[in-house]
Amino acid sequence: MTPASATSALEMRDITVRFGGIVALNGVSLTLGAGSVHALIGPNGAGKTTLVSVLSGERRPNTGTVRMNGTDISTLSALRRARLGLTRTYQLTALFQGLTLRENLLLSLVARDRPALSPADIFRRRDRTRHADEVEDLLDRFALRGKAGEKPAALSHGDRRRLEIAMALATGPEVLLLDEPLAGLSTADAEALVRSIEEGIKGRIPILLIEHDMDAVFYLSDAITVMVNGTVLASGAPEAIRASPEVQAAYLSEEDDF
Amino acid sequence: MLIFDKVSAGYGQSPVLFSLNLDLPSGAVSTLLGKNGMGKTTTVRTIFGLTSRITGDIVLNGRRINGLAPHQIARMGVAVVPEGRQVFPTLTVVENLIATSRDETARARSAAVQAIFEMFPRLEERKRSYANLLSGGEQQMLAIGRALMTRPRFLILDEATEGLAPTIRREIWAALRRLKEEHYTILVIDKSLKPLSKLGDRHNIIRKGELAWSGTSDELMRPDGEAMRLLGV
Amino acid sequence: MTALILEQLLNGLQLGVLLFLIAAGLTLIFGVMDFINLSHGSLFMLGAYFAVLFQGLTGSFFLAVTLAGLGVCVVGLIFELLLVRRLYHRSHLDHVLVTYGLILVANESVAILWGATPIFSGLPESLSTLVALPFGISYPVYRLLVIGVGIVVAAVLFWLVKYTRIGMRVRAGATNRAVVSVMGVNISLLFTLVFGFGAFLAGLAGALAGPLLSVQPGMGETVLILSFVVVVIGGLGSIKGALLAAIIVGLIDTMGRAFLRDFLSAFLSARVASEAGPALASMLVYILMALILFFRPEGLLPMQKRS
Amino acid sequence: ETVDVGLILSLSGSGAVLGTEMQKGADLALEMSGGKLGGLEGHFLYEDDQRKPDVGKTAAEKLIRSEKVDFVIGPSYSNVMMAVQAPIVRTGTILISPNPAPAELAGANCDANYFSIPFQNDQPAEALGLHMNEKGIKKVFVVVPNYQAGKDVVEGFKRTFKGEIVSEIYTPLEQNDFSAEMTEIKTADPEAVLAFMPGGLGVQFVKQYDQAGLKPMADLYTVFTVFNGVSLDAIGAAAEGVYSVDQWTYDLDNPANKEFVAAYSTKYGTLPSNFAAMAFDAVRLIDGAITAAGGVEDKEAVRAAMKAASFQSVRGDFAFNTNQHPIHAMYIARVSKDEATGALAVRNEGMIVDKMADSYAAECTLE
Amino acid sequence: MRSPSAPALVLALFAVGIGPLAALLADDPYLLSIFERFLIFAVAASSLNLILGYGGMVSFGHAVYLGVGAYATGLLANSGYEALWLQVPVVVVVSAIAAFLIGKIALRTTGVHFIMITLALAQILYYLAQSSSAFGGDDGMVISARSALWPGFDAYDPWQFYAFVAVTALVLLGLVDLVARSDFGRRLVATRENAQRANALGFDVTGTRLVAFVIAGAVCGLAGMLLANQSEFATPGYADWRRSGELLAIVILGGVGTRSGPILGAMVFVVVEHYLVSVTPHWPILFGPLLILVVLFFHSGLAGLVKALGGRFLAPTAEDGR
Ligand SMILES: Nc1ncnc2c1ncn2[C@@H]1O[C@H](COP(=O)(O)OP(=O)(O)OP(=O)(O)O)[C@@H](O)[C@H]1O
Ligand SMILES: Nc1ncnc2c1ncn2[C@@H]1O[C@H](COP(=O)(O)OP(=O)(O)OP(=O)(O)O)[C@@H](O)[C@H]1O
Ligand SMILES: [Mg+2]
Ligand SMILES: [Mg+2]
């Protein structure tokens, strides 16, 4: 084990993804330190979501390796990585549409036990009882109680986004990949989520945070990487990034300065 | 331009809007604010008759539009950037733009497409891509472009800046300002208050399906005013 | 031998184009509008019956074929207005059951009106001749006509779906009706018209196939399955794909029937070959479909790949 | 006292072509005898098997257990026959086949309660072989569907035919287009073609044979493919000149047949098909047997009377072999216009063989 | 909550009990064989419902296991192995293997492609049976003896045979219900609702689907064994696509993903097959509109209808069971 990997939760080397002629990621390397919040920012279409899909195993890169806690997981399927506790959220929410909120959360809690396919489960019914209390707990924490019996289709957009995050957190992740968790949340809810990440998770679980809300990014992150057009433009401590004129030009700029 | 007169509406039997009154003046930028799940999107859907409207009247340019089909309302010059993008996944970028274009000649259409590409150069680079393969932000740009292609006089943007990078967001606000100068009527739903306060003429906050507050930009931004409290900031 | 192979290739092509013609309306309604229309086969059957009816009334074959197409179009429009439009937003399974119900009604109505047994559908003299082609092949004029019509239909459909605004709107409407209508498109009217056009194509195919096949109740069902095979292995919504798939299916089927037995007897005993040959020939289309979907789960030329 | 006859026929779906013909023939027979069978009140119970063996089996149980019929006539197709034969005959009920007569039931599995009215399946093809030998036809091309009955036809033909079979083709059962086969026939250039294409397949095959311009090149000989009424109406002029081998034709010269054809034409407005004729004969067989046995109570007597075949068959001479399949004449027939009506009809061209017995009777252990 | 299982049980017992009752009242043991068919189709349909309703896998080739089960039974019986204790494991293994192979290939695809590939694979087996002269080809195969349970059991006695079918069907229906409502069943539903998310949660989507597919295949194979016994016949027609279509129709008509749907659907199907048919030969013209009306007005089929009629107690839906 190299010294670097001893402290790194997730380490990606030289990742390239091509879609036909489009090069979405071009030799990206990045290290997510254990227990740190590492923000990944960049213009639209820079390849951030694609990188998350590569890490989660949902997309095979053309080249590159991924190591998690020191072991090479490049060849593992998305399923195997999920069972190692590598959890992601989806930018375009991915919920169980036909099931109630309560069911959605329950299934996420079940996933925390990383259940394998077992013959016993074919005849057994205990998920529901085992996690009953925690489901209620989650409903309260994410202010979804009023809608517990509804299906996702009957939620407002913001509520759906909250459910998305809640489901990811419920799985008891080892490493968390958050793809624009604040998008769609009202200011108040966004602040609440930032606070709960800061208090509840930060420092315990390593997080790769993709976000266009710069206030949140600078508030939460320990390190920032800026990507443009599939390549890493800059990487470093938040203050350094904020000061970099290159980054300023490519990405940052005051929104209300129009 | 658009008036909600005691409109109650919702999904199926359960109402979400309760006797909502709204007045969106012509040629101005109005906003609709509120926490998640308060009924902003439902209001937009109700304009097009996509919810079950229970009572009240909606008046557009002096004409009652209750009961008209969505496409009839759209043809009166209303366009929307729907929440959650909802681009047409099986169409390419260009096709997404052309499909609902209101221009009748091919030349006019390609000119209009070109104008959109100037606004969002990123889209031009992806113009032959199917829309579901675009990144989140690219889809959002496409949704805005698509709405503009219908040559609206009244533009509704429901969280149109979600997922966009700061630079693009600034472009959009700038574009809206230009439209405002051309006397478009605009309704914006968004969560970034600063740009809204620079752009908007009149702000409305809804809470649990009712109009809870309405005022000017200055009133909105007053640090411990009623508005801030309602928004939970 | 070359002449034989060439003629069999021509047969395969001809069968392929005929299959495409039959599948054309289905590609439109299923592939583009995303509505599973099992009653497509019934519309095809009605086309054959209407052609017989109109030929009796008008005495002109071409007029009868056109009228049959239009007649089926009207039937299709009625279906759409009464039933189908209530189902677009429902699941595929609901489509399946309702249109299965329509099959039952259509077959039985035809059986009541025309009897349960095959009826006569013939060709005018001028079309029942043979033409001499190069390599000493003489080929029925009518089959060449079918090839011609099939290619024209393919071209029209391709243009319609891919390049016209109507085509784009229909494709858009198939995935998100609400947004299309909010953009100012009268999508229900559009869908009605397109469904009617799909029915027209089914009717046309039935009218043209009548003189080759046995015109009887239920004649649409075997054809229906083959049409679905063609549409699916071509790639949903892709006209080019459907045409390609139809021709491949036509060729494979014809070549399998023509040469598989001889081919097998090169390796196997004559007895086994003559057992296995025909068995394999009838499975060939399905084996082909299974293979194509196994290696290319989205079909040959999908409209788009899923991300 | 009444006589209950159950008829299991294919009355809906693709099999209805034959089933409805048989229904017409049977109905006519009962009507002509004034609703009586052997002097007793005759009562028909129709069951539709939809050409599905399991549906046929359930229908059979209903007729035997619930309706307790005295006789069953049916079914229309051999796949259903295989499923219903054993359950019916083992209860002692008499089963009469109006059409399918698979080899198994004529040989090893023959049964005292099972009678086949029309033939044993292989017979027409066997007779055709004889006919071709006689005419000196040497090169024959054979096309049949790829299933048991198709294979039986080929076997039967080979049993008697002495010339060369240039090619034998088995086509899938659900086939719409025969152009590949037509090309093969053209290339093989045979003197004659033997085709067995039942039901809708026959309509397609004969039409496409004509369209491919093959009729002048090679004579088309068929078995179970073209028949009067629906089949010829659907094929039209394309059928003209096609040969068929049958145990019966509508123009056979005997009083029973004349009476049948006249009554049938009056009632239904078309010439009868051989399926109608066989169903007619089946009812007549029951009628004759009850008369001879003096009622239906004594099953043994009824069976004996049936075996004696004491009725006027539309075929003229008619007798049962030991395996209760017919010994009868086979004819060569050809499609041409009926002088009286102008309609196309399968018309007799002469007898091929008289008193023909089937090839499986020896395997049957019945006395 | 364990109570919801009671109503389903009630319905199943009712389904099994109604046959003998009707036969006794009408003094007509033949009625039993209609109810046998009903039970057999209920089992086949409920196995399809497991993958279709709970797993979202629209198999258009499910009848193939009816065929596999029937032929396996027939071949055993005709070679002298009539003992049930021998036939059952063979049928289960053979149809499970068939389902495993078909599933392994078909599960690479989803949606309409899955429909078509299951159809294709089933058709291949269908043609295999149809052209195999060893099994009787298209004419089918007569089965010389029904399964033997124990000495003294008379499989040809209507009452005893009905009892055999009824008990087997009850066990199988219960089994399918148990699986559908187990923890496994709940994960199966998750894969139906969003495979991507289910995978990301660490549920083995492909494995879960395959297991469900194999269970459904084996249960349907046993239905095929019953069908073979009942009709004493095996025919390629059992595996025909039309038969698969009928099974689909039964499930959709009854209510996809509902616990009682397949039973209600099979009941209507058999009633139509036997009674409507005797009312008029043009029965489809009545049955077709019935299907259409049910779909248009009752979102979850007959189960939905029963529920709408206030029979919520009798026909709890899948959701209720959770
Ligand atoms: N499956 C695909 N096929 C083709 N192109 C793709 C595919 N997926 C993504 N792309 C393209 O790759 C580029 C990177 O996409 P990605 O979603 O990673 O961007 P992103 O950085 O997450 O952007 P955003 O901030 O807008 O979400 C985009 O230009 C997109 O159009
Ligand atoms: N399809 C639906 N069926 C039933 N209820 C719905 C449906 N869509 C929304 N609702 C409910 O209506 C209420 C208002 O939703 P709406 O989408 O209008 O909120 P919003 O103000 O736009 O919120 P957000 O900021 O999260 O987008 C919410 O309580 C939501 O749960
Ligand atoms: Mg992204
Ligand atoms: Mg909203």
Image: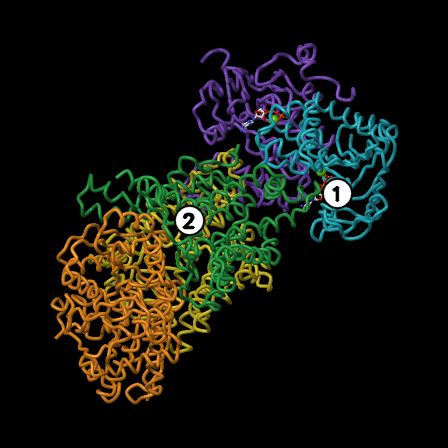
**Number of marks present in the image shown:** 2
Numbered label attached to residue E128? none
Confirm whether residue B78 shows in the render. Answer: yes
Front residue of A144 and B103: B103
Name which residue type carries label 2.
Answer: Leu
**At which x and y percent is residue B193?**
79, 28
Read off the residue under disc 1.
Answer: B75
- Say which residue appears at 76% left-offset and 28% top-offset: B192
Which chain did the renderer colour yellow? Answer: E
Name chain C's colour: green
What color does chain B have in the rendering? cyan
Q: Numbered disc 2: what chain?
A: C
The residue identified by callout 2 is C226
Residue B114 image point, x, y percent: 68, 26
Dot 2: element: helix
Going by the numbered disc 1, the residue's amino acid type is: Arg
Please give the letter of the chain rendered in purple.
Answer: A
Q: Is mark 1 within 8 Å of ligand 4?
A: no
Asked if badge 2 and badge 1 are on a common chain, one would say: no
Residue D312 sits above or below residue B60 on the image: below
- Inter-mark Cα distance, 2 to 1: 42 Å
**Quadrant of the rendered structure where residue C260 is?**
top left
Alpha-carbon neighbours of circle 2 within 10 Å: few (<14), some, or many (≥20)?
some
